[in-house]
């Protein structure tokens, strides 16, 4: 029972439900209590299996030996991951999946899940997506809401990063539907709603953002301090800004940044610094925006990649435009490389948008027009049609129309 429960990502409290206690579940798993027939059937049903399957504990010697061998290979693959040997981990996990066959469903599922993670680290998006879709069709996934939600969330995030926003929305909605079956306070509920809010804002469903933000806000309170809570606050901040509450949005981003300061998520902290800085340049006090820019410079020095350099150039350009220094904006814009490795399709379009603004401010109307058009086309290709429309409007109007929120300044987690 313990093995099946853990493979589905459930706690003893999850399995206990409202009619049993976690301590009773622990006693059963440790062999110190034998449940009656009614309780046994209830436990089996919650695990998506049968009493007969749970009672089949006596495995033939060769089957048990094979299972222990697979588990050993899985542990070795995890060690390779921790050591940073991603190709080695991939080979080991592929071997486990191939050898597991039938009869070792939980081990095979774990190996496939970890293989999908490794493929993401190896920047193999096609195989990463295939691995996740394979997992989504796995009977074990379909029988366990927590596992189902985790795979759907991962797939939604992958498709969003790939610039396939319509597909990302679909899988995020599936994750929200599945996690609706879980009790409040489960981290998967907050993660599913955060993913749906982020991909909905990117795709331009801004009228929906307010409702999704309110739903996510209700999920934040039970979350422990850490990356998930920070990400949820960050996502709600985006909805608040688009809803016309920039001050509240900046407060939420500052709170999220404080939470991340105690974690090891360097990449996430850098992404949040960009989001906070860009929003401050669009709607915050000038002194706060300048202070955030200096911090962004310090953070970028720690992560010197082509994408990081381009993002810093975007922030520098936005800051110069905020202070009405067109020559300085044009100078910083030279370092913006929309084709830098590591940029998502939306990142690329946003970089082009700021490049266009810099060119226009410095009198380069022809270059600005070309950049605006390329940014709009990039947004359209990704499915961010509202952002594309805003780009075309800014091109034809000769500047941003009105004093409302600048949607290009919103970076979601």
Image: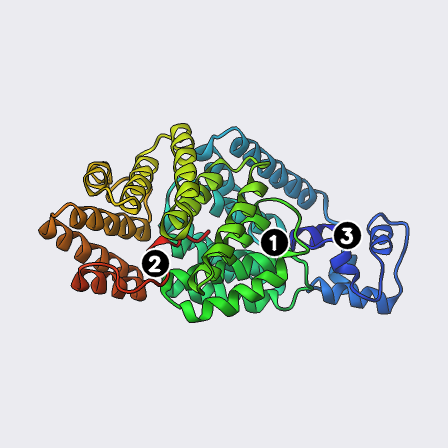
Q: Which mark is residue 57?
A: 3
Which image quarter holds the N terminus? bottom right
Residue 268 point in image, percent of width and height:
48, 42
Residue 25 point in image, percent of width and height:
83, 55
Question: How many other residues sit within 10 Å of disc 1, few (<14), some (14-19) or many (≥20)?
Answer: some
How much space separates mark 3 and mark 1, taking CA atoms?
Answer: 15 Å
- Asked if 389 appears above or below 308 in the picture, the reply is below
Q: Identify the mark nearer the N-term, 3 or 1.
A: 3
How much space separates mark 2 and mark 1, taking CA atoms?
Answer: 49 Å
Q: Which mark is residue 406?
A: 2
Q: Identify the mark nearer the N-term, 2 or 1.
A: 1
Q: Identify the mark nearer the N-term, 2 or 3.
A: 3
User: Does the rendering let one see residue 99?
Assistant: no
Residue appearing at x 39%, y 44% in the figure = 286
Please tell me whether mark 3 or mark 1 is closer to you in this view: 1
Please tell me whether mark 2 or mark 1 is closer to you in this view: 2
Residue 107 point in image, percent of width and height:
61, 48
Residue appearing at x 87%, y 55% in the figure = 24
Compared across the picture, whether 272 is left or right of 191 comes to: left
In the image, 173 versus 358, the foreground residue is 358
How much space separates mark 2 and mark 3, taking CA atoms?
Answer: 61 Å
The kind of secondary structure element at disc 2 is: loop
The reply to whether the C-beta atoms of the residues labelled 3 and 1 are less than 8 Å apart is no
Please tell me whether mark 2 or mark 3 is closer to you in this view: 2
Question: How many other residues sit within 10 Å of disc 2, few (<14), some (14-19) or many (≥20)?
Answer: some
Residue appearing at x 66%, y 64% in the figure = 182
In the image, 345 versus 282, the foreground residue is 282
In the image, 77 versus 16, the foreground residue is 16
Q: Which residue is mark 1?
A: 105
The number of numbered badges drawn on the structure is 3
């Amino acid at each position: 029972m313990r093995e099946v429960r853990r493979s589905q990502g459930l706690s003893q409290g999850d399995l206990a439900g409202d009619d049993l206690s976690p301590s009773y579940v622990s006693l059963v798993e440790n062999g110190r209590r034998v449940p009656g027939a009614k309780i046994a059937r209830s436990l089996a049903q919650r695990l998506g299996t049968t009493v007969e399957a749970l009672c089949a504990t006596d495995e033939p010697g060769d089957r048990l030996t094979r299972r222990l061998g697979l588990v050993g290979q899985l542990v070795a693959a995890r060690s390779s991951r921790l050591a940073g040997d991603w190709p080695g981990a991939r080979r080991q996990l592929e071997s486990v999946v191939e050898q597991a066959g039938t009869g070792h469903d939980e081990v095979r599922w774990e190996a496939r899940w970890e293989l999908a993670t490794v493929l993401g680290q190896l920047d193999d998006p096609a195989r990463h997506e295939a691995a996740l879709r394979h997992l989504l069709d796995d009977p074990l996934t379909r029988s366990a809401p927590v596992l189902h939600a985790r795979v759907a969330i991962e797939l939604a995030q992958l498709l969003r990063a790939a610039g396939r926003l319509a597909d990302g929305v679909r899988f995020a909605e599936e994750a929200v539907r599945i996690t609706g079956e879980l009790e409040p306070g489960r981290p998967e509920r907050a993660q599913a709603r955060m993913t749906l809010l982020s991909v909905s804002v990117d795709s331009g469903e801004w009228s929906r953002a307010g409702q999704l933000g309110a739903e996510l806000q209700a999920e934040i309170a039970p979350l422990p301090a850490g990356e998930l809570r920070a990400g949820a606050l960050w996502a709600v901040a985006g909805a608040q800004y688009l809803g016309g509450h920039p001050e509240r949005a900046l407060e939420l981003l500052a709170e999220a940044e404080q939470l991340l300061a105690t974690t090891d998520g360097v990449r996430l902290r850098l992404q949040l610094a960009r989001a906070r800085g860009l929003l401050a340049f669009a709607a915050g006090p000038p002194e706060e925006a300048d202070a955030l820019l200096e911090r962004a410079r310090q953070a970028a020095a720690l992560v010197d990649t082509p994408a990081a350099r381009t993002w810093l150039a975007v922030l520098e350009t936005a800051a110069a435009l905020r202070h009405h220094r067109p020559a300085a904006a044009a100078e910083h814009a030279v370092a913006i490389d929309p084709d830098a490795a590591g940029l998502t399709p939306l990142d690329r379009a946003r970089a082009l948008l700021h490049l266009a603004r810099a060119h226009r401010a410095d009198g380069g109307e022809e270059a600005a027009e070309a950049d605006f058009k390329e940014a709009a086309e990039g947004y359209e290709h990704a499915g961010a049609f509202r952002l594309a429309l805003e780009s075309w409007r800014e091109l034809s109007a000769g500047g941003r129309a009105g004093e409302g929120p600048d949607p290009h300044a919103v970076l979601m987690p």
